[in-house]
Image (cartoon, coloured by chain):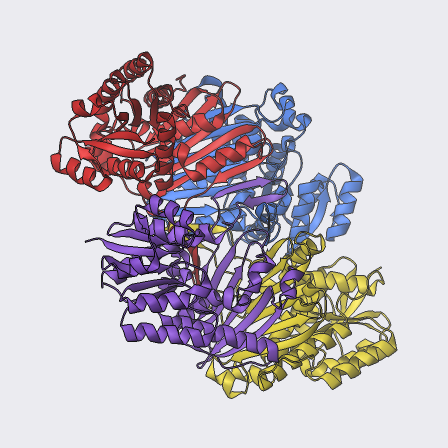
Chain colours: A yellow, B blue, C purple, D red
Amino acid sequence: MTHSVCVIGAGRIGRIHASNFAALKGAAVRYVVDPVAEAAEALASAVGARPAGLEEALADPAVHGVAICSATSTHADLIEKAAAAGKAIFCEKPVALDMERTLKSVEAVKKAGVPLFLAFNRRFDPQFAALRKAIDGGSIGKVEMVQITSRDSAPPPASYVATSGGLFKDMMIHDLDMARWLLGEEPVLVSAVASCLVDPAIGAEGDVDSAAVTLQTASGRICQISNSRRAVYGYDQRIEVHGSEGLAQAGNVLENTVRISGVQGTTDARLLDFFLERYAGAYKAEAAHFLEIMEGKSKPLVSGDDGVQALKLAEAAAKSLATGMAVAP
Amino acid sequence: MTHSVCVIGAGRIGRIHASNFAALKGAAVRYVVDPVAEAAEALASAVGARPAGLEEALADPAVHGVAICSATSTHADLIEKAAAAGKAIFCEKPVALDMERTLKSVEAVKKAGVPLFLAFNRRFDPQFAALRKAIDGGSIGKVEMVQITSRDSAPPPASYVATSGGLFKDMMIHDLDMARWLLGEEPVLVSAVASCLVDPAIGAEGDVDSAAVTLQTASGRICQISNSRRAVYGYDQRIEVHGSEGLAQAGNVLENTVRISGVQGTTDARLLDFFLERYAGAYKAEAAHFLEIMEGKSKPLVSGDDGVQALKLAEAAAKSLATGMAVAP
Amino acid sequence: MTHSVCVIGAGRIGRIHASNFAALKGAAVRYVVDPVAEAAEALASAVGARPAGLEEALADPAVHGVAICSATSTHADLIEKAAAAGKAIFCEKPVALDMERTLKSVEAVKKAGVPLFLAFNRRFDPQFAALRKAIDGGSIGKVEMVQITSRDSAPPPASYVATSGGLFKDMMIHDLDMARWLLGEEPVLVSAVASCLVDPAIGAEGDVDSAAVTLQTASGRICQISNSRRAVYGYDQRIEVHGSEGLAQAGNVLENTVRISGVQGTTDARLLDFFLERYAGAYKAEAAHFLEIMEGKSKPLVSGDDGVQALKLAEAAAKSLATGMAVAP
Amino acid sequence: MTHSVCVIGAGRIGRIHASNFAALKGAAVRYVVDPVAEAAEALASAVGARPAGLEEALADPAVHGVAICSATSTHADLIEKAAAAGKAIFCEKPVALDMERTLKSVEAVKKAGVPLFLAFNRRFDPQFAALRKAIDGGSIGKVEMVQITSRDSAPPPASYVATSGGLFKDMMIHDLDMARWLLGEEPVLVSAVASCLVDPAIGAEGDVDSAAVTLQTASGRICQISNSRRAVYGYDQRIEVHGSEGLAQAGNVLENTVRISGVQGTTDARLLDFFLERYAGAYKAEAAHFLEIMEGKSKPLVSGDDGVQALKLAEAAAKSLATGMAVAP
């Protein structure tokens, strides 16, 4: 039996998820919903779906799941509507930029009894998944310290920053989720230091572009996160986990394996430059996971509560930065 | 306009090429031809094609190209029939195991005036393509010496060896093609040394499983090839090219980027173990290339003549091994 | 002309410095001073010196420099005595564990007008020196963020911890000095998180064994330091510096370049396990630098004031840990 | 007891060996012999020796060993004289460039009953020694195929080439010795291909500058050697050994561990550029080994017979190149 998805949002990330669902044996895209008719039509045509309005799509009992890929500000409403319609929900992170709205949506989902899968892509990245598997397999003993390096290749425009929720909620929230996932315990302390070093326009929006956050769990495990909005050498995504019996490191993914040795030394290829390339495998794995959820074979590996916890950490980081104190999330 | 392919052979490699054509915008699989009806039907159903007999498929003017993925012994006949039918031809290497049959088929193709693309997958591998691009871009100056390391992860069964044509024609022929492609000049001298070190059953078939071949071009460029039928650490596929101004190396592809440090040292992930994984990207690129050929936008990057030249080198290697002399191909 | 050194302290580090001075063209060891007569005699004999009492050695005008390699608690006194005797001073870090005593000694040295070289070994490590040189050469643009990873291979005995001054003053002080050296600006903010994860006996002494400290300079540059008292895979000493135009990383030093590939993957050699091996090159460079100081050709690259600043940062880290606040050093 | 060495030859390599002997506890340099008086005096003064004539030095019973570091053409005579004087002999490779002279000297040494240590430095290189140790420890199972890459960073002047004995005897002889050492069996077949690609002046002297040689042992083990007189990226010295259960690779030694990532990719430091730097550790280990020989604690790890075998392989390579046939050494 094929499970059908309605994809909401025909922008960049919507196109990726739609084509992954379309390529997946057992899944199909039935509708594409987007207020921009041309975008909806183009994507629908590419994936064997048809454009539709939200209400029509949600009313169709042949739709098993809804993939929310629209602007962040619309996520909470759409989650609630999809929940009311009894659909399985796939939602790009975050639920919302404020806690109250987030909690309300998550509550609505629980009441409706539908599964909500919050698409924190990094948990599905083959590199980080292999890292976690190695740790779970005991290869480094008990986790003690985690270091997460996460740098965008280039800063976003200031206009994006203005509505992004700020670095902690927009960018570091991925790393905060990784930290929770790898520490194996909830952080009880958050301490943040941050600066505007990359682009003064980001500072003018009241945001930072370079940040260092430290987390600590109740048993004392520690995580350091380093964020920058610029890395001219490519999208820098590395994690290392230090344990009682060893060290596990997930490295960057290079464009290819070619090395050139010349008078200056030996040069490896560039890093994959952009999150869409770097996490292409993660997006495919997310689609496969959501299919299993629709099929009732799996519970969401990232739930609405995970979104709540990550948001709490991001808010704690912002508060720590503002007060100069380590704060409890 | 969509270009339609008839895939001949519904075995392992046929399934790969068929699904790549099916996934390619602008291409479709129209027929699957295989004497085993269940295999033909299963593959046809998976790629939106229908099973058919060879004559029916070749007679259909809606078929633009034929992808020959059947047993080696059938290639030459099929090439000739497809050429007679005026189809563009995609053929798994080799054309044939003997030179006479190979030349006859290549001649038939030339007379028919159809394009023949001989699918030497390594030219399409993203790693080796990046290597070649770096060399063409001048990053190492003039090519002087090439080293090709090519080791299967595990030896084939002796029954396979019996009909394979032997290591030089079955396995090293890929490396001989790489050598021609990277040396930038035709080899004029071939010198071979080989042994049976891995599996006595291979020796019992009159074949070798470990071989070292050296090629030299008229201007003196040198290539060393190392082959083994076993590499317990994975499918070992590396090339390095030494030039007047530097060294370019294409390395192996690992399962992931995770490194584990423990008391024994630091361990990287295994190599991709199998040619179907390692060259998955190459197969996709081959399909895309053949689509361009069918569209008339591109000439085959590997022609029947390339197949002839590689076979000549393989035959020369066998002769050198038998005589203890460096021989001209 | 040969410049003569009096080495005070014939323990492990004294033996290293003494033999480096002895091997250095232009330098000689004239006296070894140690209350344990056998130790003084053994070392003196090995380096062509003779054992002597402190007063005798300081009174000898043929002694140009004094190398203080004795227990930490004796450093301040010895610095003052050597300064009073007009000798150039080489002193193992730290001057003292408390600020008052440190400032008093540094003041005495300034009054005496003698050079004091505080031997922070990492500034002389060939890896970190090459890192600094690359940064100074402009290879990564303007420094923005520094990450320092520093892990001992095994925890010290609790008895050592009891008199060590604690992790921040004993171990992280090296990293704090590296941070100052690489940030290019003084930190104005220090924020610390720490735990006892490795050995409860360390906690019983009131110390921590795992720590994460973040520094920030006035212009906003950020440094994260990670310390652990245990790394079963070897002495883990890495620094990376992220700048406006690139990333510079100084990696660990391995026992050798041999890699073994087997069914489990590919394994590199262990890290050098111990600071005496890892920093052997640094100790030689320190001796050479001190010779240049004695010869009047160079000023100390690490002064008493550098020791004061590093100690301030260590004290600020301890205060931040105690208060949960980011503090100014 | 100190064992005294007479160093013959005060050139580049003589200075290295002399200073290593001088720095070695238990060894001393007593005489330096060189027809250029200034050179002999300068070196003697630097290592605590005195200049002397050959006869005087050999007549002195306080001399335990002779280190022959003079021009190749003098080696055989000096070996015979030192043997006649009953001294332990350390001799830079080769004994002589022709087989007859080599055999005569080796015979003289055997008759005299003195130890002759032929200083093939690579057996003492820490990287290759670790490689051999890993193999001996069983980490790759049974040795099957060896690949040796050996490239000088820059070609020698044609004047050097004229008297060098040619690439096979001058340069590849090191690799031929490595091959014997790592194959664990004597080669019974040698096949050579070579060109002049780097410098026509080398060709004008009748020599080659780029060569590929294949060896095979009686049980079928295979070794490929690649030589070039130029590698602009540094002195390229790598060996890999493929066995029934894995692969062992000894890599190049870099100037430092610093990596710079920028828009072009990630660049590692250059290789050590010159054999004197790359093999500095090997020369020290040779001195220590010769001291053990003088002390009677060890037999030479490389004997005159090893020199004979390596020369036989070099001559066989030259013959194979001339005849186009694989030849028995």
Residue shown at 67%/80% (left/top)?
A: A72
- Relative placement, left or right, of A204 versus D68 is right
Asked if residue A13 is positioned above or below residue D69 in the image, the reply reads below
Q: Nearer the viewer, residue C310 or A68?
A: C310
- Relative placement, left or right, of B296 versus C9 is right
Q: Nearer the viewer, residue D164 or A116?
A: D164
Image quarter for residue D302? top left
Image quarter for residue D42? top left
Residue shown at 39%/71% (left/top)?
A: C306
Provide residue C91's location: percent of width, then percent of height: 37, 63
Q: Residue furthest top?
A: D111
Q: How many marks?
A: 0
Is any part of residue D199 visible from this angle?
Answer: no
Asked if residue A262 is positioned above or below residue C226 in the image, the reply reads above
Q: Nearer the viewer, residue D216 or D272?
A: D272
Provide residue D281's location: percent of width, then percent of height: 38, 40
Provide residue A73's location: percent of width, then percent of height: 68, 83
Is any part of residue B161 visible from this angle?
Answer: yes
Asked if residue A105 is positioned above or below residue D276 in the image, the reply reads below
Q: Nearer the viewer, residue D25 or A98?
A: D25
Provide residue A103's location: percent of width, then percent of height: 77, 82
